[in-house]
Amino acid sequence: MYQIIDGKKISQEIKDELKEQVAQLKAEGKSRCLAVVQVGNDPASGVYVNNKKKACEYIGIDSLSYELPEETNEEELLKLIGELNTREDVNGILVQLPVPKHIDEEKILLAIAPEKDVDGFHPVNVGNLSIGRPGYVSCTPAGIIQLLKRSGIEIEGKECVVLGRSNIVGKPMAMLLLRENGTVTVCHSRTKNLKEITKRADILVAAIGKPKFIDASYVKEGAVVIDVGIHRNENNKLCGDVDFDSVAPHCSAITPVPGGVGPMTIAMLMNNCVNGVL
Ligand code: GUN
Protein backbone atom coordinates (compact mmCIF):
# COMPACT_ATOMS: atom_id res chain seq x y z
CA MET A 1 0.00 0.00 0.00
CA TYR A 2 1.30 3.46 -0.82
CA GLN A 3 1.11 6.61 1.27
CA ILE A 4 -0.64 9.59 -0.28
CA ILE A 5 1.24 12.71 0.72
CA ASP A 6 -1.53 15.12 1.68
CA GLY A 7 -0.37 18.61 0.69
CA LYS A 8 -3.68 20.14 1.62
CA LYS A 9 -3.39 18.92 5.21
CA ILE A 10 0.32 19.72 5.58
CA SER A 11 -0.09 23.22 4.09
CA GLN A 12 -2.95 23.84 6.53
CA GLU A 13 -0.75 22.77 9.46
CA ILE A 14 1.96 25.20 8.30
CA LYS A 15 -0.55 28.04 7.90
CA ASP A 16 -1.91 27.39 11.38
CA GLU A 17 1.60 27.43 12.85
CA LEU A 18 2.28 30.70 11.04
CA LYS A 19 -0.98 32.18 12.30
CA GLU A 20 0.14 31.55 15.87
CA GLN A 21 3.56 33.03 15.17
CA VAL A 22 2.03 36.17 13.65
CA ALA A 23 -0.27 36.58 16.69
CA GLN A 24 2.82 36.31 18.91
CA LEU A 25 4.65 38.89 16.79
CA LYS A 26 1.64 41.21 16.98
CA ALA A 27 1.67 40.93 20.76
CA GLU A 28 5.27 42.19 20.58
CA GLY A 29 4.12 45.09 18.40
CA LYS A 30 5.59 43.64 15.20
CA SER A 31 3.68 43.16 11.98
CA ARG A 32 4.27 41.57 8.58
CA CYS A 33 3.18 43.04 5.26
CA LEU A 34 3.31 41.56 1.77
CA ALA A 35 2.93 43.73 -1.33
CA VAL A 36 1.44 41.77 -4.24
CA VAL A 37 1.82 43.31 -7.69
CA GLN A 38 -0.06 42.06 -10.75
CA VAL A 39 0.28 43.65 -14.18
CA GLY A 40 -2.52 42.93 -16.66
CA ASN A 41 -5.42 40.56 -16.14
CA ASP A 42 -4.25 37.06 -16.95
CA PRO A 43 -7.07 34.96 -15.39
CA ALA A 44 -4.77 32.26 -13.94
CA SER A 45 -2.57 34.95 -12.34
CA GLY A 46 -5.72 36.56 -10.94
CA VAL A 47 -6.65 33.30 -9.17
CA TYR A 48 -3.12 32.84 -7.76
CA VAL A 49 -2.95 36.44 -6.54
CA ASN A 50 -6.34 36.16 -4.88
CA ASN A 51 -5.30 32.96 -3.12
CA LYS A 52 -2.15 34.66 -1.88
CA LYS A 53 -4.15 37.59 -0.50
CA LYS A 54 -6.62 35.22 1.17
CA ALA A 55 -3.77 33.27 2.79
CA CYS A 56 -2.32 36.55 4.14
CA GLU A 57 -5.67 37.41 5.64
CA TYR A 58 -6.03 33.97 7.26
CA ILE A 59 -2.59 34.14 8.86
CA GLY A 60 -2.78 37.79 9.87
CA ILE A 61 -0.23 39.19 7.43
CA ASP A 62 -1.17 42.61 6.07
CA SER A 63 -1.29 42.72 2.31
CA LEU A 64 -1.09 45.55 -0.18
CA SER A 65 -2.52 44.84 -3.58
CA TYR A 66 -1.42 46.59 -6.77
CA GLU A 67 -3.46 45.63 -9.82
CA LEU A 68 -1.87 47.53 -12.66
CA PRO A 69 -3.28 47.76 -16.20
CA GLU A 70 -1.79 45.72 -19.05
CA GLU A 71 -0.40 48.95 -20.62
CA THR A 72 1.79 49.69 -17.58
CA ASN A 73 5.33 50.26 -18.84
CA GLU A 74 8.58 48.95 -17.40
CA GLU A 75 9.56 52.31 -15.97
CA GLU A 76 6.29 52.63 -14.05
CA LEU A 77 6.62 49.14 -12.63
CA LEU A 78 10.25 49.73 -11.65
CA LYS A 79 9.21 52.98 -9.93
CA LEU A 80 6.60 51.13 -7.84
CA ILE A 81 9.12 48.43 -6.88
CA GLY A 82 11.61 51.14 -5.91
CA GLU A 83 9.01 52.69 -3.61
CA LEU A 84 8.09 49.36 -2.04
CA ASN A 85 11.78 48.59 -1.52
CA THR A 86 12.16 51.66 0.66
CA ARG A 87 8.90 51.37 2.61
CA GLU A 88 9.65 50.21 6.13
CA ASP A 89 6.16 48.80 6.65
CA VAL A 90 6.54 46.41 3.68
CA ASN A 91 8.69 43.34 4.33
CA GLY A 92 7.82 41.24 1.28
CA ILE A 93 7.36 42.11 -2.40
CA LEU A 94 5.94 39.75 -4.98
CA VAL A 95 5.45 40.54 -8.66
CA GLN A 96 3.18 37.89 -10.13
CA LEU A 97 4.65 36.25 -13.23
CA PRO A 98 4.31 36.30 -16.16
CA VAL A 99 4.47 40.06 -16.72
CA PRO A 100 3.27 41.37 -20.12
CA LYS A 101 5.71 40.82 -23.00
CA HIS A 102 6.74 44.49 -23.28
CA ILE A 103 8.24 44.31 -19.78
CA ASP A 104 11.64 42.66 -19.20
CA GLU A 105 10.98 40.07 -16.48
CA GLU A 106 14.63 39.76 -15.51
CA LYS A 107 14.95 43.51 -14.96
CA ILE A 108 11.91 43.40 -12.68
CA LEU A 109 13.17 40.48 -10.60
CA LEU A 110 16.57 42.19 -10.24
CA ALA A 111 14.90 45.39 -9.04
CA ILE A 112 13.26 43.76 -6.00
CA ALA A 113 15.45 44.22 -2.92
CA PRO A 114 16.87 40.74 -2.10
CA GLU A 115 15.85 41.14 1.55
CA LYS A 116 12.20 41.57 0.45
CA ASP A 117 12.27 38.94 -2.30
CA VAL A 118 9.86 36.45 -0.71
CA ASP A 119 9.66 34.48 -3.99
CA GLY A 120 13.39 33.76 -3.78
CA PHE A 121 13.91 34.63 -7.46
CA HIS A 122 16.59 37.35 -7.09
CA PRO A 123 20.09 36.18 -8.12
CA VAL A 124 21.42 37.08 -4.66
CA ASN A 125 18.97 34.64 -3.07
CA VAL A 126 19.57 32.01 -5.77
CA GLY A 127 23.32 32.39 -5.18
CA ASN A 128 22.96 32.16 -1.41
CA LEU A 129 21.03 28.93 -1.77
CA SER A 130 23.69 27.43 -4.02
CA ILE A 131 26.54 28.19 -1.60
CA GLY A 132 24.58 27.17 1.50
CA ARG A 133 24.09 30.65 2.95
CA PRO A 134 20.76 31.74 4.44
CA GLY A 135 18.43 33.44 1.97
CA TYR A 136 14.91 33.31 0.63
CA VAL A 137 14.18 30.01 -1.09
CA SER A 138 11.80 29.53 -4.02
CA CYS A 139 8.45 28.46 -2.53
CA THR A 140 7.54 25.33 -4.52
CA PRO A 141 10.80 23.45 -3.90
CA ALA A 142 10.86 24.62 -0.27
CA GLY A 143 7.32 23.23 0.03
CA ILE A 144 8.42 19.87 -1.38
CA ILE A 145 11.12 19.58 1.30
CA GLN A 146 8.42 20.23 3.93
CA LEU A 147 6.15 17.58 2.35
CA LEU A 148 8.96 15.03 2.59
CA LYS A 149 10.04 15.95 6.12
CA ARG A 150 6.55 16.14 7.54
CA SER A 151 5.71 12.77 5.96
CA GLY A 152 8.68 11.17 7.70
CA ILE A 153 10.62 10.60 4.46
CA GLU A 154 14.37 10.77 4.89
CA ILE A 155 16.41 12.53 2.20
CA GLU A 156 19.95 11.98 3.47
CA GLY A 157 21.86 9.48 1.36
CA LYS A 158 18.93 8.91 -1.00
CA GLU A 159 19.15 8.91 -4.79
CA CYS A 160 17.12 11.96 -5.75
CA VAL A 161 16.25 12.58 -9.39
CA VAL A 162 14.78 15.93 -10.44
CA LEU A 163 13.09 16.07 -13.82
CA GLY A 164 13.21 19.64 -15.11
CA ARG A 165 15.75 22.45 -14.75
CA SER A 166 13.65 25.60 -14.44
CA ASN A 167 14.94 28.48 -12.33
CA ILE A 168 11.80 28.38 -10.18
CA VAL A 169 11.55 24.64 -9.48
CA GLY A 170 14.16 22.26 -10.93
CA LYS A 171 17.37 24.08 -10.07
CA PRO A 172 16.43 25.22 -6.53
CA MET A 173 14.94 21.76 -5.90
CA ALA A 174 18.28 20.17 -6.71
CA MET A 175 20.08 22.60 -4.39
CA LEU A 176 17.68 21.94 -1.51
CA LEU A 177 17.92 18.16 -1.87
CA LEU A 178 21.72 18.53 -1.86
CA ARG A 179 21.49 20.67 1.27
CA GLU A 180 19.58 17.76 2.86
CA ASN A 181 22.44 15.43 1.87
CA GLY A 182 20.63 13.67 -0.95
CA THR A 183 22.56 12.42 -4.00
CA VAL A 184 21.06 14.51 -6.76
CA THR A 185 20.71 14.09 -10.53
CA VAL A 186 18.95 16.67 -12.69
CA CYS A 187 17.38 15.46 -15.95
CA HIS A 188 15.93 17.61 -18.75
CA SER A 189 14.70 17.51 -22.32
CA ARG A 190 18.14 16.62 -23.72
CA THR A 191 18.86 13.86 -21.20
CA LYS A 192 19.68 10.51 -22.83
CA ASN A 193 18.35 7.22 -21.45
CA LEU A 194 15.96 9.04 -19.16
CA LYS A 195 14.26 5.91 -17.84
CA GLU A 196 17.56 4.38 -16.76
CA ILE A 197 18.16 7.42 -14.58
CA THR A 198 14.64 7.86 -13.19
CA LYS A 199 14.50 4.17 -12.30
CA ARG A 200 17.44 4.70 -9.93
CA ALA A 201 15.52 7.30 -7.95
CA ASP A 202 14.50 6.74 -4.34
CA ILE A 203 12.90 10.20 -4.58
CA LEU A 204 11.66 11.33 -8.00
CA VAL A 205 10.52 14.94 -8.49
CA ALA A 206 8.65 15.48 -11.76
CA ALA A 207 8.59 19.09 -12.96
CA ILE A 208 8.64 18.77 -16.73
CA GLY A 209 5.33 20.33 -17.66
CA LYS A 210 4.00 17.40 -19.71
CA PRO A 211 0.69 15.86 -18.64
CA LYS A 212 0.94 12.25 -17.36
CA PHE A 213 4.45 11.92 -18.86
CA ILE A 214 5.73 9.67 -16.06
CA ASP A 215 4.17 6.22 -16.10
CA ALA A 216 5.14 3.12 -14.13
CA SER A 217 7.99 2.30 -16.54
CA TYR A 218 9.96 5.34 -15.22
CA VAL A 219 9.68 4.44 -11.54
CA LYS A 220 11.56 2.07 -9.24
CA GLU A 221 9.45 -0.16 -7.02
CA GLY A 222 9.01 1.58 -3.64
CA ALA A 223 10.09 5.05 -4.82
CA VAL A 224 8.71 8.33 -3.46
CA VAL A 225 7.18 10.33 -6.32
CA ILE A 226 6.55 14.08 -6.13
CA ASP A 227 4.45 15.60 -8.91
CA VAL A 228 4.90 19.33 -9.53
CA GLY A 229 2.85 19.42 -12.77
CA ILE A 230 -0.63 20.85 -13.06
CA HIS A 231 -2.61 20.46 -16.27
CA ARG A 232 -6.15 19.91 -17.46
CA ASN A 233 -6.76 16.63 -19.25
CA GLU A 234 -9.13 16.01 -22.15
CA ASN A 235 -12.09 15.88 -19.71
CA ASN A 236 -11.09 19.19 -18.13
CA LYS A 237 -9.95 17.36 -14.99
CA LEU A 238 -6.73 18.38 -13.23
CA CYS A 239 -3.75 16.06 -13.66
CA GLY A 240 -0.01 16.23 -13.10
CA ASP A 241 3.21 15.25 -14.89
CA VAL A 242 2.73 11.78 -13.38
CA ASP A 243 0.14 9.25 -14.50
CA PHE A 244 -1.08 8.69 -10.94
CA ASP A 245 -3.11 5.52 -11.53
CA SER A 246 -0.24 3.79 -13.33
CA VAL A 247 2.51 4.93 -10.92
CA ALA A 248 0.92 4.94 -7.45
CA PRO A 249 0.75 1.13 -6.94
CA HIS A 250 4.55 0.99 -7.40
CA CYS A 251 5.38 3.77 -4.92
CA SER A 252 5.93 3.92 -1.20
CA ALA A 253 4.56 7.48 -1.24
CA ILE A 254 3.18 9.84 -3.88
CA THR A 255 1.65 13.32 -4.11
CA PRO A 256 -1.76 13.66 -5.76
CA VAL A 257 -2.80 16.42 -8.19
CA PRO A 258 -4.63 18.43 -7.02
CA GLY A 259 -3.89 18.50 -3.27
CA GLY A 260 -0.18 17.63 -3.31
CA VAL A 261 2.54 20.15 -4.13
CA GLY A 262 0.15 22.94 -5.23
CA PRO A 263 -1.10 24.10 -1.82
CA MET A 264 2.46 24.08 -0.43
CA THR A 265 3.65 26.93 -2.64
CA ILE A 266 1.42 29.49 -0.95
CA ALA A 267 2.11 28.06 2.52
CA MET A 268 5.84 28.52 1.94
CA LEU A 269 5.33 32.02 0.55
CA MET A 270 3.54 32.83 3.80
CA ASN A 271 6.41 31.23 5.72
CA ASN A 272 8.87 33.42 3.83
CA CYS A 273 6.81 36.50 4.74
CA VAL A 274 6.71 35.57 8.44
CA ASN A 275 10.12 34.04 9.04
CA GLY A 276 12.32 35.62 6.41
CA VAL A 277 15.20 33.51 5.25
CA LEU A 278 15.40 29.70 5.49
N1 GUN B 1 3.70 32.68 -11.39
C1 GUN B 1 3.54 31.34 -11.25
N2 GUN B 1 4.08 30.92 -10.09
C2 GUN B 1 4.59 32.01 -9.49
C3 GUN B 1 5.27 32.22 -8.25
O1 GUN B 1 5.54 31.31 -7.46
N3 GUN B 1 5.62 33.51 -7.98
C4 GUN B 1 5.36 34.54 -8.83
N4 GUN B 1 5.76 35.75 -8.48
N5 GUN B 1 4.74 34.37 -9.97
C5 GUN B 1 4.35 33.12 -10.30
Image (cartoon, rainbow, N blue to C red):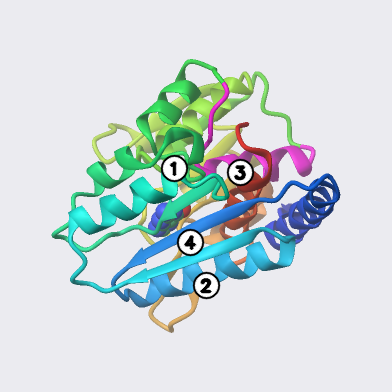
Q: Please tell me which residue is depicted at 28% across the width and 52% down the height of the picture.
A: 79
Residue 8 position in % (x across, y down): 70, 62
- Amino acid type of the residue that numbered disc 4 sits on in the rendered structure: Gly
Along the horizontal axis of the image, is 25 left or right of 265? Answer: right
Position of residue 171 relative to residue 4, above or below, is: above
Pointer 4: what residue? 240
The crowding category of the residue bearing disc 3, from other C-alpha atoms within 10 Å (few below 14, some 14 to 19, many at least 20), is many
- Say which of marks 3 and 4 sits in front: 3
Q: Is residue 177 left or right of residue 230?
A: right
Q: Which mark is residue 272?
A: 3
Q: Nearer the viewer, mark 3 or mark 1?
A: 1
The disc at residue 86 is: 1
Q: Position of residue 56 (x, y in %)?
A: 64, 62
Distance from disc 3 to disc 2, alpha carbons, whole Å, reads 18 Å
Q: Is residue 6 magenta?
A: no
Which of 112/149 is in front?
A: 112
Bounds of the magenta segment: 134-152
* CB contact under 8 Å: marks 1 and 2: no
| Residue 98 falls in image quadrant | bottom left
Where is residue 69? Give x, y as percent.
27, 74
Comes first in the chain, label 3 or label 4: 4
* Residue ID at (65%, 54%): 267
Of the residues shown, which amino acid type is indicated by label 1?
Thr
Q: Which residue is mark 2?
A: 50
Q: Secondary structure at mark 1?
A: helix
